[in-house]
Image: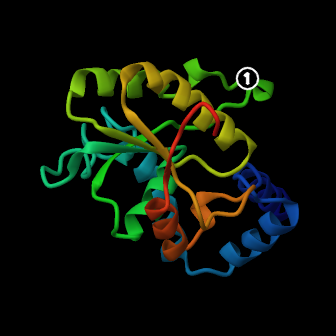
Amino acid sequence: MSNGIVENLINALMKLPGIGRKTAQRLSFYIMGMPADEVKSIAGALLEIKEKARFCRLCFNITEDELCAICSDPARDKSSICVVEEPSNLIVIERTKTYKGLYHVLLGALSPIDGITPEKLKINELLERIKTGGEVAEVIIATNPNTKGETTAQYLSQVLKPLGIKTTRIAQGLPIGGDIEFADEVTIAKALEGRKEMTDNN
């Protein structure tokens, strides 16, 4: 009976990204040794985020309200939009405290081999924001510096070109093949500062 319960927990944890069997097993035994109130707190937090969290109507950041705190902040610079793949990327950039503009979360990156086409990302919503907003002067593309991120950046550059919007790409500091989520604040800040305007040649 106990083996069945432990196995169920291991299998459940393995559904999380980056969690293999050994890690899931280690976590399972750690959870078994935790006080009951701490386990209930974690379980409650998991249920709460599923019940209350949703995507911002404008930028698709995670929020409890119709608009996230960034989109609803009148002090943010509405002339620039920083495009990221996931809400986790947005959080890292915010920690730098150097970027004061708005964001747009694509909720993924282009990967035709995996069936992730432009229609499955929030690209049309980005274009609509720019067309109807009227204040956007620059779009900063901050997708990850890997194959999927670069493919996405090039595609965005092409579809934004007809709109006459300055399109820049974060530059120095991020290693090729890396992930923004795991970069430190100083590296991200330097990448934002060193962003370059995108052309047909880059």
Q: Is residue 9 left or right of residue 141?
A: right
For the C terminus, give its image quadrant.
top right
The answer to whether one can see residue 44 in this image is no
Spot occupied by residue 90 in the image (x, y as percentages of width and height): 44, 54
Q: Amino acid at mark 1?
A: Gly
Q: Is residue 11 left or right of residue 102?
A: right
Residue nearest the viewer, comparing 52 with 188 = 188
**Residue under numbered circle 1:** 115
Q: Quadrant of residue 181?
A: bottom right
Task: Indicate whether 70 appears above or below 98.
Answer: above
Task: Indicate whether 176 appears above or below 148.
Answer: below
* Colour basis: rainbow
Spot occupied by residue 4 in the image (x, y as percentages of width and height): 83, 56
Residue nearest the viewer, comparing 65 with 69 = 69
Spot occupied by residue 144 in the image (x, y as percentages of width and height): 62, 50
The answer to whether one can see residue 48 in this image is yes
Spot occupied by residue 94 in the image (x, y as percentages of width and height): 38, 63
